[in-house]
Amino acid sequence: MAKASTHNDPAGTKSEVWTVSELNRRVKGLLESNVGKVWVAGEISNWRVSPAGHAYFTLKDDRGQISAAMFKGKISRLKFEPEAGLEVMVQGQVTLYEARGTYQIICDDMQPKGVGALQLAFDQLKAKLADEGLFDEDHKKPLPLLPRKIGIVTSPTGAAIQDMLNVLDRRFRKAHVILYPARVQGVEAAPEIVAGIEALDEWGVDVIIIGRGGGSLEDMWPFNEEIVVRAVYQCATPIVSAVGHEIDFSLSDFAADLRAPTPSAAAELVVKEYAALVDQVDDLKIRLSRSLKTNLESWRNRLDRARSSYIFQRPEELIRQPRQQVDDLRMELERITVEDLRMRRVRVDRAARSMALLSPDHQLRRAVEKLAGVRQRLLHAGTSGMERHRGLLTQLTGQLDALSPLAILSRGYSLVRNAGTGEIISDAKQVKKNDAIDITLGSGSASAIIEDAKPEGT
């Protein structure tokens, strides 16, 4: 533990020097001893829950704020879900968080400001379960008309069970009632109600009633617990919820297949009154008898009218006209058949002619004839083209001969080349005395030696 030391200040007096941790510890002790536990009202801000389940948040008003913390064990006792923006009143110990030197309040309890915790929890859970579809009408099941086994989950010592048994005994004594005793008030009530619902559902009763008499919201709270509401929703057996008086509503009422305003009303809704059923059956018997008599009399009258009718006096008329109609239909059928055969024969003849024109032999003959014509035209075109090209060739040959150097040489001219270089000599300046030359004549060639060269102008 750090110890305070002494220090001489400028005035020469000794003053005590604190360490940071010692100062924080001293301030923490002063806060806890002088302020202690208090109730503080404010708005929740920055609500966050750590992985360990502890909550850290800021409690603020329009002029200030304070850090706050609430540990997991305390949070689990709350009936509602704290959230940012909620106005609350918290009770807790004002202290200092030594590691940071900030003061805070460690909350032991929290209450919504302006509305009860139970009512807020009711509204929050109702909205959550409604969003999940637990209150949807299309999920609700109809009640059986005449249930033989009725299951009831309630307290065996309360007035509610006696009221329900009295109604069931008066209205329908033949119904078999199975009571699953469960507490309907207190922290242990909800698990027992859930166990009762699941047990009766498994036993195969025809309908289940859950409920209790009236009381405060806190007394009836087990029927608002989430586990109870989900058990009601998931139950395969139709459930009637009868919690409290007519003005009371629980979340189980919204999830149940039918809500009764009171336990007695639930019993009346589940079974029909026996005497009323007997009267209803008797009334149906009378109505059935009257209906049978009326129908019998109607058929008797129709039979009497039929006996006195013209048809029954002359029964052959029943078949004469149908026979005539059959003859007419036969003749019409024969006419239609003949006409249809004629039309089909015409179509067959047309098809045969078309087939003959389209047959391979016919197509081949036409192709051979067409090929012969093409061959004739091709021969004619080839002969004409050859004659035309032969005349052109003769003309070009004449022109080529006229322009050929050989033709020029044949007229007495010659072609002179330098014997060494092969260069054509067209000027006397290209040679000199004693140069060897080659002379190409119109017929043959000759070689010579230049004895003298005389360029033009000399």
Image (cartoon, rainbow, N blue to C red):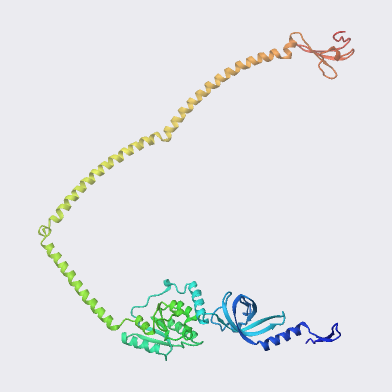
Viewer-nearest residue: 248 or 324: 248
- Residue under the image location 19 percent in, 73 percent down: 290
Viewer-nearest residue: 6 or 249: 6
Place of residue 117 in the rendered image (x, y in percent of width and height, measured from the top left): 53, 81
Quadrant in which the N terminus appears: bottom right
Place of residue 203 in the rendered image (x, y in percent of width and height, measured from the top left): 42, 83
Place of residue 91 in the rendered image (x, y in percent of width and height, measured from the top left): 60, 84
Left or right: residue 12 compared with residue 267: right
Residue 161 occupies quadrant: bottom left
Vertical comparison of 85 with 396: above or below: below
Residue 263 occupies quadrant: bottom left
Residue 172 occupies quadrant: bottom left
Viewer-nearest residue: 218 or 132: 218
- Residue under the image location 74 percent in, 14 percent down: 405
Place of residue 301 in the rendered image (x, y in percent of width and height, measured from the top left): 14, 66
Camera sees residue 194: no
Viewer-nearest residue: 87 or 8: 8
Quadrant in which the C terminus appears: top right
- Residue under the image location 70 percent in, 14 percent down: 403
Left or right: residue 174 compared with residue 312: right
Left or right: residue 65 compared with residue 129: right
